[in-house]
Structure formats: C-alpha cells, structure tokens
Amino acid sequence: MPFPSRLPPPAAAAAATAAAVLAAVALRRYLSTRPRSATSAHRSSTAPAAAGGGATTRLLLSGKSPQDQQLLASAASELSLEDLGGGELAVSLAPGGGGVEGFDAAAYMGALLARRFGRWLLWSPRMASTHDLVTQNFAKLPVGVVCVTDVQFKGRGRSKNVWESPPGCLMFSFTSQMNDVRKLPLVQYVVCLAMTEAIKDLFCAKGLPELDVRIKWPNDLYLKGLKVGGILCTSSYEPKVYNICTGIGLNIDNEKPTTCLNAALQELEANATRLKREDILASFFNKFEVLFEIFANQGFQALEERYYNAWLHSGQRVVVQDAHEGQSVNSVVTIQGLTPSGYLYAIGEDGKSYELHPDGNSFDFFTGLVRRKMEV
C-alpha cells in the first residue's frame, strides 16, 4: 500500500534540515524570510471574495520533522488555494510546528505519535471547505496531510447535505490511499471507530469521566441522542490506487446547533479540564493509523466487534416502509450488523434478509422508521 517512505534515522536530521532550507531558497520568488525561523509570503487570490472577505487570510504550513517541513516547502508554491477566499493570502512555513493564534500547531505536533497520518498540517482561520482544498491538491501534497480550519463556510456532508461549521467545532480533512476497491465503502466505518476510541483514550489519559460517543450508521457520531459529529469520505481513481479524502466535523466547544463534548463534560464534572482541538486531532490520528493498518492488512472483519460495540444499532427493531403497487407496505426488521460490502444487514419477522443502502433510503433510527426512496 503506497504511503510516504519511512522517516530517516536521527543522524540524518541535520541533512534534512539543510534540505528544507535549500527548498525554501529555491522558492525565493515566492517565499521571504521572517523572524523566529518562520518563512512567509503573500499571494493574491483570483477567487471571488467570500462573505467578510477582503482582509488578508493566513495559511500556516507545518511539518512535524525537518523532512516533513521540506515536503511542504517544496509544495507551497504549487498549491491551489482558491477555497481560502479572495484578497491577500499570507502563507507561513513554521518549522517544527510553531504555534499560531487560533490553533496551537506545536501542541498538536507534540501529542502526535502517528508516522503516516497528520504529520503535515495546513491551517487557516477560515476557508470554504477543508475537504475541497485537500481534494484539489491531492497530487501536490504528501499522503496523510491534514487541513484544519476554525470557520468553514461551505462545509458539506453526505448526499450534498450542508454541514454547519461554527467556531468551536473541530473541522479537518485528510488524505489516504487504498488499492482494494472492495474496501472503499468501509473506510468511513474505520474513521468513525477511530474517533470514538480516540475520544475514550484521551479522556482516560487525562483522568476525565467518559463520554459515551456512539456511531450512528453510516457516518455520524452521537452523544445522548444528539449529533455531535459527521464524516464524509470521497475517492478518485488513479492507476492501481484510489485516492481518499476524509472530512470530519466534531462539536467540541459549540453547543449549537445540537450539543458539544465540553458542554457534556462540564455536566459530569464542573471543574474538569476542557478538551482542546489539538489534543483530539492528535489522538484521532494516533488511533486511526493503528486501525487503518489492521483494516488494510486483515480487512474490516478484524475490527467488526469493536465497531459493533461502538454503534447504536445492534438488535434494534425498525420498520421498513416500502411501496408496492401504489400502497405503503411496512415490514418490521431487526438489525443484525453489516454486510461484507458495508450495507446494513437486517432480518424481517418473516425470516427474510434485508440489505439497506444509505443512499437509497431515508433513515430515522430514533423513531424506528426506514423509508425506501422510490423512483418517481
């Protein structure tokens, strides 16, 4: 499976640092040196100004190691950045994860243990869509790069649904690759599982009371019956490999439009330390890398039991509302799990098997109703 090559031994750090400097010098028409070892430049965007646009937009590029920074420095001048809106664009290279106002890249990199994912960071205080930015620049950036923003004004979910992205929400997109097309529909389940387990691991490490964040099939995260997160996976094909872009939104400090993790945490323990986006993001990639490796080598069956322990639906009885000859027909089914292709598997009271597809049905599991969408 194609991943970035392994990191060189520590003895090569000095050479990698020198290479990063040379890469920045090679881009001298684009980059100029600034204090505190950061490198910056200004570009003019040709995209129409977004709401509230006109001011200079900042974009931070940060790598965990000198060689990671070198890759970003080499890619900086080639990036398509229209999604950041109109006006002036200030691009900064912050070696070693330098901290910036709004997102503490240094704290994030310090907590990150993953060797394949999340080591290359793009951050901006606002942009149209993190998902669109990494999708448009997939070939120009290392696989595993993550793009984070504070405010997103064109976020989207599955089936072109709009994802509201207020301040306080962790919003990020990252890239991965896969060879086996049969596994593509299951990637979103690995992502959901990784986030639920990452939150539990983080709470345990900090000695915090556990929040019961659960998976609502196919790609949502719920807490106490309210949605707190969503996942969107898209893919494109190149010879012998599928490029995957995964977008995630998770409510951390924004109590609206539903609820958020810190609000639920304060209800359990008023003096509890509030969760930070940087810690959750690092914890996610630490967990996702492990699960993705298992998934790639052993298939989803190796993670299935853990997934069912984290989702809401085992043994749930729902009504499948269908139409036959113009009449509404209801069938009561019990959810058993997932099919090998990743669809919902259920058994009816008559013993018949049902395979429910997310794009062919309307699901309201909390009222126990599944409506099949019929062609007009």
Image (tube, grey):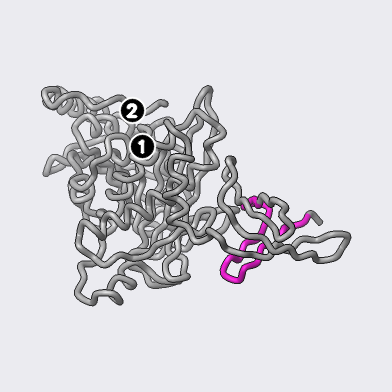
Q: Residue at x 69, y 64 (%)?
A: 332
24 over 100 or under it: above or below: above
Circles 2, 1 touching at the beta carbon (< 8 Å) = yes
Q: Is residue 153 visible?
A: no
Q: Please indicate whether residue 333 sits to the left or right of residue 245 in the image.
A: right
User: What residue is shown with label 2?
Assistant: 4
Which residue appears at 20% of the width and 24% of the height? Answer: 8
How crowded pointer 1 is (Cα within 10 Å; few <14, some 14-19, many 20+) is rated as: many
Q: Which residues are magenta?
A: 356-374
Q: Is residue 78 left or right of residue 279?
A: right
Q: Quadrant of residue 274?
A: bottom left
Residue 144: mark in rendering: 1
Residue 285: give x, y in percent of width and height.
32, 45
Q: Position of residue 81 (x, y in %)?
A: 41, 43
Please name whichever residue, 343 or 251, is drawn nearer the observer in this view of the structure. Answer: 343
Q: Residue at x 47, y 57 (%)?
A: 311
Residue 368 lies within the magenta run: yes
Q: Position of residue 208 (x, y in %)?
A: 23, 65
